[in-house]
Amino acid sequence: MGFLSFFSFGSHEKEDAIRAAEAARHASQSLDIDVSIAAHENWLTRLETYVAGHSEEHLHADNIACDDQCALGKWIYSDGKRYLGSYAAFEDLRATHKMFHFKASSIVSLSQANKREEAEQELANDLHKLSEKIKRRLLDLKSVD
């Protein structure tokens, strides 16, 4: 199911679909989708290493919880919102990305509290699912071009 299939169209379905596709093209011009996907996949690796105790990184849960500081988050709250903010598919991407950051923050907090099993569970289940959903939404957006 593509990005545009989540858009809500009224009685002028074809014209609305054309406007939505144009909005998606404008919005995606300021985002390197492949880099955004790679960055989220990299976070999974970084967190797996961190939770396993093999990382030298000093991660701060409060910073990770901020969903508007990474490149994708900055785009979501700027050009993404400007061009696509009224569409359900974009809202789904925004909410999923926000939850990804919340869960990543939670995983770091659990790990720092020596609750490794809980951190591993959240990482293996919740965070991987959220990451896949973000990836699908971004690939759907990329396919609009």
Image (cartoon, rainbow, N blue to C red):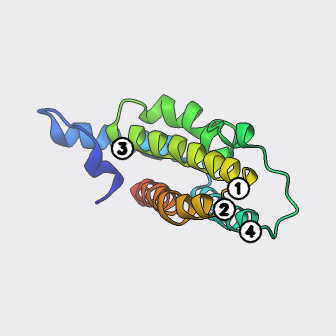
Which three-letter amino acid code belongs to the residue tagged 2? Arg
Classify residue 114 by image quadrant: bottom right
Do the residues bearing badges 4 and 3 touch, measured as CB atoms within 8 Å? no
* Residue at mark 1 to residue at mark 2: CA–CA distance: 5 Å
Residue in the image at 48% along x and 57% along y: 126
Residue in the image at 67% along x and 45% along y: 71
Disc nearest the viewer among 1 and 3: 1
Return the disc, 2 or 4, that comes first in the chain's sequence.
4
Toward the viewer: 145 or 101? 101
Disc nearest the viewer among 4 and 1: 1
Residue in the image at 85% along x and 57% along y: 57
Residue located beneath label 4 in the image? 49
* Residue at mark 4 to residue at mark 1: CA–CA distance: 11 Å
* Residue at mark 2 to residue at mark 3: CA–CA distance: 34 Å
Residue located beneath label 3 in the image? 89
Q: Residues within 10 Å of mark 4 (few under 14, many from 20)?
A: some
Return the disc, 4 or 1, that comes first in the chain's sequence.
4
Residue located beneath label 2 in the image? 116
Is residue 54 left or right of 66 when viewed as pictured? right
Return the disc, 1 or 2, that comes first in the chain's sequence.
1
* Residue at mark 2 to residue at mark 4: CA–CA distance: 12 Å
Q: Is mark 2 on a helix, strand or loop?
A: helix
Return the disc, 4 or 3, that comes first in the chain's sequence.
4
Q: What element carries label 3?
A: helix
Which three-letter amino acid code belongs to the residue tagged 3? Ala
Return the disc, 1 or 3, that comes first in the chain's sequence.
3
Residue 90 visible? The answer is: yes
Residue located beneath label 1 in the image? 111
Disc nearest the viewer among 2 and 3: 2
Q: Residues within 10 Å of mark 3 (few under 14, many from 20)?
A: many
Quadrant of the snapshot with the C terminus: bottom left
